[in-house]
Image (spheres, rainbow, N blue to C red):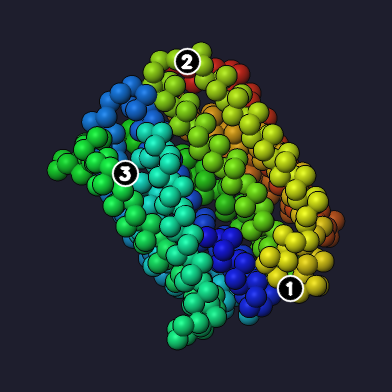
Amino acid sequence: MLVIDTAFLGRVSEVTLGAAAIGGVFYLCLVMLGTGFAVGAQIMIGRRNGAGEHYAIGQIFDHAMVILSLLAVVLWFFLDALAPLLLKNVISSEAVLQESLTFLQFRKYGLLFGFLVLGFNGLYVGSTQTKVLSLSTFVMAMFNIILDYALIFGHWGLPAMGIAGAALATNMAEFFAFVFYLTWTFKKQVHIQFHLWRQRSVDMVLLRSLLRLSVPVMFQYFLSFAAWFVFFMIIEQLGETALAASNITRSIYMVLMIPVWGLSVSVNTLVSNTLGRGATQLVIPVIRRVLYIGLIINLFLVLFLWIFPQPLVAFYTDDPHLIEATLPLLRVVAFALIAFAIGMILFSGLSGTGKTLLALKLEVLSIMFYLVTALLLAVYFNASAPILWMVEVVYFSLMGLFAFIALKRGSWKDFSI
């Protein structure tokens, strides 16, 4: 949906495109708290699924959905009260600031259904029923494309809302994805298979276990995107064109990340299911095979990026100046994609073992190197945008190295969740 929004907003203005970058990444930082919690629930569901404990899956899911709903409400109030104060102190362009605030003002209404969708993602990935994710994503994307077209530009008698229309369209797409998940769950009788939505009191032991596992993942994901938000704040100081070019780059980058994101989610639940079956000796081979697949896919994507960079950028904007500013950034992204494949899959494999607190510590260490490198390049060397984007290679390389060392040490083998 970020990709779709960026493609449409690229036809509005550079300011709007830059605001979508900052507002979008800021919003993603908060969404990552929900994503992290859902991933923690997914890991626990995967362990129970591997052990054949279907009744326990329903308990985990029910508790997770309540926590995700409460978290969405808390973050709604945060966005409403504190986001304007925070962004006013970090964005130098008044035009970009106002557009970013407009985006967030509308986007916050999507938190609840967006988080409930994340909960369903955790259920279906953890139980290895991933076909439904493709279908839900298709539903969400189709509604987003139609509504973006109508609400951003004001077609079919609707008002031209610009960036506000993009936010509203995404909210509505998430709602339709939630409705789709509910329909699928009842139609396929998944609620019976996993004993969902049974009237139960709060299980404090389960809740504590779920929070102990999930909270480190929440902060790991949050810090990862918070670092990206800081990175875009640094880019914003280079001017509106550099920011707009970086947003197009971010969007293309995220599209090309999708295969490895999917593989990292898969290796996460595969490791958890494998440990649930008691097959500890198969964990490293599983991670290794997924890593090979990720590297092969990304090598093809890098080749595609090097051969067809201009058509990719032209999908987002027809401004020759902006296209020219974006092309050097894509060459850097090509290198980052290889580091990303290695770092993300190894790191997700480590998280899948349940050692989420260790993963958080390693994430913090990687982010420290990431931000220090970016700040040094920007402040002391006045680096250009392409040089600044090189820190992505540093970040994912360190993630991969730290995760590899942790997996080799094997302290996760006797860890229970």
Amino acid bearing label 1: Asp
As helix, strand or loop, the secondary structure at mark 2 comes to helix
Q: Check whether the beta carbons of the residues at disc 3 and disc 2 lie within 8 A of each other.
A: no
- Along the viewing direction, whichever of 301 and 25 lies nearer the viewer: 301
Task: Tell whether 92 sits left or right of 414.
Answer: right
Residue 62 position within the rendered picture, expressed as x and y whole percent measured from the top left:
26, 43
Establish if 33 lies above or below 23.
above
Q: Is tag 1's residue or tag 3's residue first in the polypeptide sequence?
A: 3
Question: Separation of disc 3 and disc 2 at Cα?
Answer: 27 Å
Q: Nearer the viewer, mark 2 or mark 1?
A: 1
Distance from Cα at disc 1 to Cα at disc 3:
44 Å
Task: Measuring from the top left, give residue 232's x and y in whole percent.
Answer: 66, 61
Confirm or deny contact between disc 2 and disc 1 (CB under 8 A): no
Number of numbered discs on residues: 3
Q: In the picture, residue 25 is in which quadrant?
A: bottom right
Type of the residue with mark 2: Thr
Q: Residue 280, labelled with which disc? A: 2
Residue at point 50% right, 34% down?
A: 266
Viewer-side residue, 323 vs 410? 323
Q: Is residue 136 above or below residue 278?
A: below
Q: In front here: 306 or 58?
A: 306
Query: Could one spot residue 113 in this view of the protein?
Result: yes
Q: What secondary structure is marked by label 3?
A: helix
Residue bearing mark 1: 318
Q: Residue at x 51, y 16 (%)?
A: 282
Seen at 56% across and 72% down, the residue is 100
Residue 6: assigned label = none
Residue at the spot 25% in from the left edge and 35% down from the top edge? 194
Q: CA separation, marks 2 and 1?
A: 53 Å
